[in-house]
Image (spheres, rainbow, N blue to C red):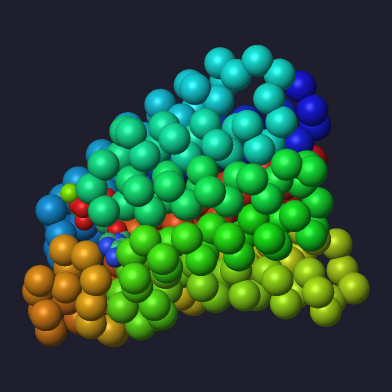
């Protein structure tokens, strides 16, 4: 297995474990403004994704990302399955030359573009986009302008995502199920932004370990 492939499988396993640990937390968030299935959707999807990734024969990072994306698309369902899964399948192609600072930036940007294309949400709509957008922009800017190791750019991206999650609380949902609540969505933390943060935190932990 390539080094990138092994790291990618480790990352997927770490995410699956974290999402399982946060299952009830994510479900509680979704029960306040949605249909109480985000924890179950994500836990089922990531457990299956980890299994599929482990079963790959000598994968590189692109193959792992593609497999995880396809598995999330078929297992997660709801609004978030195609957003997380479909965008990952699409962005995976950016890793065909392996993972380095430059390909990681194009991967992240392509992923965000795809989420925006598919879901038509932008910053301020109280969705996963509120965590993802500042994370991706911060990551890119830090890679391009800080003369520091890429792991520090990823750490800054995680901080930005955390602020993005907090930003979902005082705003009103304009996409997804929570938008049906209108002003009653104000005061609630978005589940998909929260799971996005957990995923980024695990990517950082695995990258820091290597
Ligand atoms: P469902 O709402 O179909 O039950 P989930 O509960 O798994 O699906 O996921 C809900 C999350 O999906 C929300 O918290 C939000 O972050 C995200 N989401 C929903 N609709 C959109 C959209 N149009 N664009 C971006 N993200 C969205
Ligand atoms: Mg839901
Ligand atoms: Mg649902």
Q: Residue at x 42, y 73 (%)?
A: 130
Q: Residue at x 52, y 31 (%)?
A: 67
Q: Is residue 125 left or right of residue 133?
A: left
Rendered-image quadrant of the N terminus? top right
Q: Is residue 183 left or right of residue 25?
A: left
Q: Is residue 157 above or below residue 125?
A: above
Percent x, y of residue 155: 68, 64
Q: Residue at x 33, y 34 (%)?
A: 74
Answer with the quarter of the image where residue 93 lies. top right
Query: Which residue is more in the foreground, 64 or 43?
Result: 64
Query: Which residue is more in the foreground, 14 or 114?
Result: 114
Residue 25 seen anywhere in this rendered image of the structure: no
Percent x, y of residue 167: 39, 80
Rendered-image quadrant of the C terminus? top right
Q: Is residue 7 above or below residue 108?
A: above
Farthest residue toward the right? 147
């Amino acid at each position: 297995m390539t080094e990138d492939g092994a790291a990618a499988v480790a990352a997927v396993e770490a995410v699956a474990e974290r999402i399982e640990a946060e299952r009830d937390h994510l479900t509680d968030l979704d029960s306040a403004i949605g249909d109480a299935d985000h924890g179950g959707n994500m836990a089922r999807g990531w457990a299956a994704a980890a299994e599929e990734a482990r079963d790959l024969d000598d994968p590189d990072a692109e193959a792992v990302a593609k497999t995880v994306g396809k598995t999330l698309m078929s297992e997660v369902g709801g609004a978030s399955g195609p957003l997380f899964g479909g965008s990952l399948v699409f962005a995976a192609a950016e890793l065909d030359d392996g993972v380095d600072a430059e390909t990681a930036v194009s991967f992240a940007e392509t992923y965000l573009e795809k989420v925006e294309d598919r879901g038509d949400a932008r910053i301020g709509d109280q969705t996963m986009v509120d965590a993802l957008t500042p994370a991706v922009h911060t990551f890119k800017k830090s890679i391009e302008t800080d003369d520091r190791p890429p792991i520090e750019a990823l750490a800054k991206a995680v901080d930005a995502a955390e602020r993005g999650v907090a930003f979902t609380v005082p705003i009103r949902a304009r996409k997804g199920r929570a938008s049906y609540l209108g002003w009653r969505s104000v005061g609630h933390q978005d589940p998909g932004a929260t799971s996005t943060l957990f995923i980024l935190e695990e990517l950082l932990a695995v990258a820091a370990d290597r």
